[in-house]
Amino acid sequence: MVKDNEKHLDGAKKIFTKANGIVNKLFGKLIAKIDELDPSDNTKQRVISAVILVPLAVYAICASKSLFFFFAIVITILMTAEWLDLIKSAQDQKKWRLIGLAYIAIPMYCVLELRMRDSNILLWMFAVIWSTDIFAFFSGKTFGGPKLAPEISPNKTWTGLAGGIFASMIIGFISAFMFRGGIFFFVFFSIVLAVVEQASDLLESKFKRTFGVKDSGNIIPGHGGILDRLDGMMLTAPFVLFLVTAFSNRF
C-alpha cells in the first residue's frame, strides 16, 4: 500500500515537472506575442516574474523545508511592512493594525501548518491559486465581457472567473492522483478553491480601494507588492486547512 502511494506521488510529481516545462515554453512564446501586440503592457513583466518565482516556490514547497520556512519569515515581514504603509492614512490605526494582524497571521499560520502536514497539499493549493489567477487574467484580457466587481476591481470579468475555474478543474484532476480523495472530490474542491481565490483577490482590492492605493508595493515587477502577489492565498489557506481537518481521510 505504501509503495503504491509512493508510485502515485512520484507519477504526479513527474506530471507537474513536465507541465512546468511546457508552461515555461508557452510563456516564452506568449511574451513574444505580447511584445508584438502591445509593447507598453506590463504583462511581459508579470510573465517573467511568474516564470522565475513559481519554480522557486515549488522547490521550496516540495524539496526544502528550511528554505520554505526562511521564505515564510521574509514574506511575513514584507507583508507586514506593506500593510503598515497601506494603512498609514487611516484615522483608526489600532483597528486597522488588528485587522492586518489577522489578515496576515492567520493565512501564514495555515500555510506553515499545511507544509508540516504534507507538502503535496500545499502544492495542490498553490497550483490551484496560480492556475486560477493566470487563466483568469488571460481569459479576461482576451475575451472581456461583463465585469465581476467593477466597484472593487474594474479589470476582473466573469469570463476571467470562468477561465480560472476551468484551469482549477485541470489541476484538480491531476492532483487526485496524489491523494486518496478521488477525482470528483478534488475537481469539485478545486473549483471551490478557485472561487475562494478570486474572492480573496477581491478582498485585497477592497482594502486598496479603501485607502486609494493601486498596488501594495513595487517589489515584484508587473505584480506590485507581496500582498498583491499572495492576495489569493489569504482566504484560500484557511479554507484548505479546514478541508484537510474535516476530510483528513481524503488526503
Image (cartoon, rainbow, N blue to C red):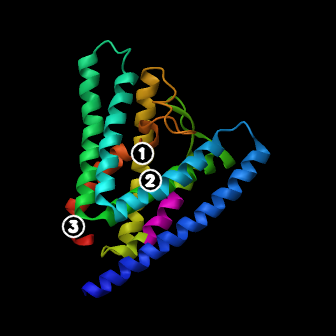
Dot 1 alpha-carbon crowd within 10 angstroms: few under 14, some 14 to 19, many 20 or more? many
Mark 2 in CB contact with mark 1 (< 8 angstroms): yes
| Among numbered discs 2 and 3, the one appearing first in the sequence | 2
The correct choice, above or below, for 165 with respect to 231 in the image is below
Q: Give the residue displayed 45% in from the left and 71% down from the top.
A: 173
Q: In what element is the residue under mark 1? A: loop
Dot 2 alpha-carbon crowd within 10 angstroms: few under 14, some 14 to 19, many 20 or more? many
Picture quarter with the C terminus: bottom left
Number of marks? 3
Mark 2 in CB contact with mark 3 (< 8 angstroms): no
What type of secondary structure mainly makes up the magenta span?
A: helix
| Among numbered discs 2 and 1, the one appearing first in the sequence | 2
Picture quarter with the N terminus: bottom left
Name the spot of residue 128 as percent of width and height, x first: 44, 58
Instruction: Give how far apart the Cα atoms at labels 2 and 3 are.
Output: 21 Å
Range covered by the magenta-colored residues: 165-174
Mark 2 is on which residue type? Ile
Q: Which residue is mark 1?
A: 232
Please say whether residue 172 is one of the residues in the magenta stretch.
yes
Q: Quadrant of residue 250?
A: bottom left
Q: In what element is the residue under mark 3? A: helix
Mark 3 is on which residue type? Ser
Mark 1 is on which residue type? Gly
Name the spot of residue 6 as percent of width and height, x first: 32, 81
Q: In what element is the residue under mark 2? A: helix
Q: Quadrant of residue 11?
A: bottom left
Q: Which residue is mark 2?
A: 129
Q: Give the residue displayed 40% in from the left and 28% down from the top.
A: 207
Instruction: Give how far apart the Cα atoms at labels 2 and 1 are.
Output: 6 Å
Please say whether residue 129 is one of the residues in the magenta stretch.
no
Q: Give the residue displayed 47% in from the left and 30% down from the top.
A: 217
